[in-house]
Image (tube, rainbow, N blue to C red):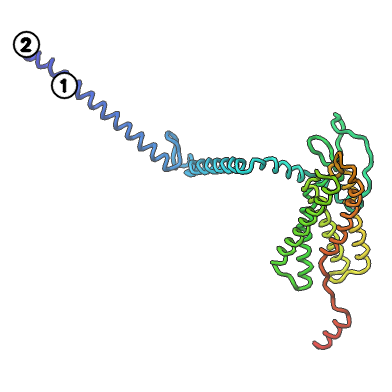
Amino acid sequence: ALLPGSSAVQASPAVGISAMEQGKSAQWEDVNMEGHEAASSVSSGTSPGQPGADGETPSGVLSDSVTNVMVSTFARELTQGSKAFWPQLEQVQQLLASYFNVTHGYVLRKLLWQLVPLPPSKGKDTDGELGVEQDWMKRVRHGLSMDTEEPDLYIPLMGFITYVLLCGLVKGLKEEFDPDMLSATATFAATILAFEVAAAKAALFVAGAVGAPVCDLAALLGYKYFHLALLIISGLLLGLGGQPGRLYQLLALWLMASCGLALWRTLRRLPRMQPSSGQEVAADIHSVVIKALPVTQALLCWLLLPSWPTLPSLATIAESTTSSL
């Protein structure tokens, strides 16, 4: 009687061990299924547990995210590397931003003042006052309005580009246009400006203005390209594509005179263009320098003007027409 009971008691542990083995094998199968789902979700661009390609999530989400992370990381590394290579890069960027911080109203006012450089009117200073509407034609920097004579680089740069394109147009009217001519004209004009800035810096240094900024000089001497662009446009309109007449010559004299007068007023009023303390002996030299620089602007305007095409006369046109008939 005891033998059957003992065999039953001995058989129950075997049954429990087999049940445990079956449970472990089921768990491993679940883990393998989850691994296959994760791999399929990565390959299809979806996260585990989310629907796949049946309209829920596009397959390019993961690739777009990886691309964005790579681009942002590359930009950050490039910026940090540039700052490490040139620590003053941020200061240079802020300096250039201050020269290009202009508004439409300021540009209009500055262009009109370049054409008619009258002394600025002394109005009431309302900087910093609450409830007072600021003049929309004034240039503001750090919350304070700047004088009209303060230089910027936006107008000289736009004037330079317009001048180069107009020279190409004049060459086209003369049937002498060449794509390389644009780069040659830009190089020649930029070289002239660089020599001007270097000569003006040296002259002002001798005159006692040792702290004259190079960017200010480049902007002030670059305003003449606005006058040149306006003069070429006037010549094209007055000459109808040919040699302009007397009215153009009078207009050229006015624009050259206004260019020189605007430069003289600016050099006379800007504090950083004046002799520094202890350099009062060079005041006479400074007075000569700020008068000589505007004269050179008129001469350079004449040098940088393109030659105009000559239209055939009426007699030549009649003769060519008769010969063709």
Q: How many marks?
A: 2
Residue at mark 2 to residue at mark 1: CA–CA distance: 20 Å
- Relative to 256, does residue 20 appear above or below in the rendering? above
Relative horizontal placement of residue 203, taking residue 72 as reference (left or right):
right
Which image quadrant for residue 73? top right
Q: Tell me the element at label 2.
A: helix
Where does residue 315 sit, x and y in percent of width and height?
88, 83
Which image quadrant for residue 14? top left
Q: Earlier in the sequence, mark 2 or mark 1?
A: 2
Which image quadrant for residue 42? top left
For the point 88% across and 59% down, which residue is it? 298
Q: Residues within 10 Å of mark 1 (few under 14, many from 20)?
A: few
* Residue 262 visible (yes or no): no
For the point 86% across and 36% down, which residue is it? 134
Where does residue 91 sit, x and y in percent of width and height?
70, 40
Residue bearing mark 2 = 2
Relative horizontal placement of residue 176, taking residue 266 as reference (left or right):
left
For the point 50% across and 41% down, which residue is it? 66
For the point 87% across and 54% down, which residue is it? 293
Amino acid type shown at disc 2: Leu
Where does residue 301 sit, x and y in percent of width and height?
85, 61
Residue bearing mark 1 = 14
